[in-house]
Image (tube, rainbow, N blue to C red):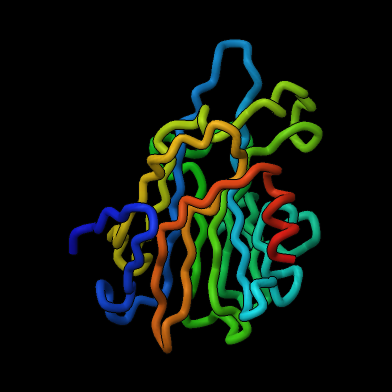
């Protein structure tokens, strides 16, 4: 099976391309255009699992690194000692926080896993996002991070992989230049009857992660 390259706004039926698909890996990557001596980029992946009212059913369905501090965590199967957040239905296992990008090593910068068969019936869609961490939430408390935006980040993408065989099903490369925005909804998984589809969104916002939290909580 060859991978499908999507454009912004394209929708893709996962079940048609991969019948019997259950667990998907969501891989995301980017290449910050950092300047020597400049502020460090810390990009974070999160997911909002929302119901028919466009809100998360409970705090657990906001999958982000902060859930680990709240105790909603599971140890990574491969990288022992590192933890991932997870939803209360056990369907989504979120990304390992990688503030300095040291874990990517040519692979996806961050990834998460979704067991589509376990997603609560309360959830109608899962919106997958990436945000730039800024002062005062950045590790080095560097006020210069306030000026960072996705216009300074190259080669952003999201891809979906069939976890059972490691084959990439689809990929969406962001082509827009977001010169002011610091939060991007890369894509969403949504129910169509008993099946799941994916939409390449590429919808950008200002206000970093807090803007998305305000929208969906």
Measured from the top left, where is residue 119 in percent x and y? 55, 79
Name above or below for residue 27 compared with residue 125. Answer: above
Name above or below for residue 189 compared with residue 33. Answer: below
Would residue 192 appear left or right of 3 to someone viewing this image?
Answer: right
The residue nearer to you, when weighing 192 against 38, is 192
Regarding residue 167, the answer to whether it shows in the image is yes
In percent of the image, x 62 and y 35: which residue is there? 42
Name above or below for residue 69 compared with residue 53. Answer: above
The residue nearer to you, when weighing 79 against 11, is 11
Name the quarter where the N terminus is drawn. bottom left
Determine the image quadrant of residue 6. bottom left
In percent of the image, x 60 and y 38: which residue is there? 181
The residue nearer to you, when weighing 87 against 46, is 46
Number of marks in the rendered image: 0
Regarding residue 98, the answer to whether it shows in the image is no
Would residue 135 appear left or right of 52 to someone viewing this image?
Answer: right
Determine the image quadrant of residue 71. bottom right
Residue found at the very far left of the displayed protein: 1
Name above or below for residue 57 compared with residue 132. Answer: below
Measured from the top left, where is residue 27 in percent x and y? 44, 52
Measured from the top left, where is residue 67 in percent x and y? 73, 59
Determine the image quadrant of residue 139. top right
Would residue 133 appear left or right of 102 to someone viewing this image?
Answer: right
In percent of the image, x 63 and y 28: which residue is there? 148
In percent of the image, x 55 and y 79: which residue is there? 124
Name the quarter where the C terminus is drawn. bottom right
Measured from the top left, where is residue 211 in percent x and y? 71, 51
């Amino acid at each position: 099976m060859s991978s499908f390259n999507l454009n912004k706004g394209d929708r893709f039926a996962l079940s048609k391309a991969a019948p019997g698909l259950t667990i998907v890996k969501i891989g995301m990557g980017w290449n910050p255009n950092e300047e020597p001596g400049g502020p460090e980029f810390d990009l974070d992946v999160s997911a909002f699992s929302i119901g028919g009212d466009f809100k998360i059913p409970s705090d657990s369905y906001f999958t982000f690194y902060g859930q680990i501090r709240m105790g909603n965590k599971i140890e990574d199967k491969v990288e022992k000692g590192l933890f991932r957040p997870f939803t209360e239905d056990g369907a989504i296992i979120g990304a390992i926080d990688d503030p300095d990008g040291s874990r990517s090593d040519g692979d996806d910068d961050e990834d998460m896993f979704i067991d589509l068969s376990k997603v609560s019936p309360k959830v109608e869609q899962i919106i997958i996002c990436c945000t730039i961490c800024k002062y005062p939430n950045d590790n080095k408390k560097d006020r210069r991070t306030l000026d960072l935006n996705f216009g300074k980040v190259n080669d952003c993408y999201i891809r979906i992989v069939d976890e059972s065989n490691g084959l990439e099903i689809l990929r969406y490369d962001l082509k827009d230049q977001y010169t002011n925005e610091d939060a991007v909804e890369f894509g969403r998984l949504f129910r169509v009857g008993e099946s799941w589809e994916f939409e390449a969104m590429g919808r950008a916002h200002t206000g970093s992660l807090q803007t998305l939290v305000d929208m969906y909580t």
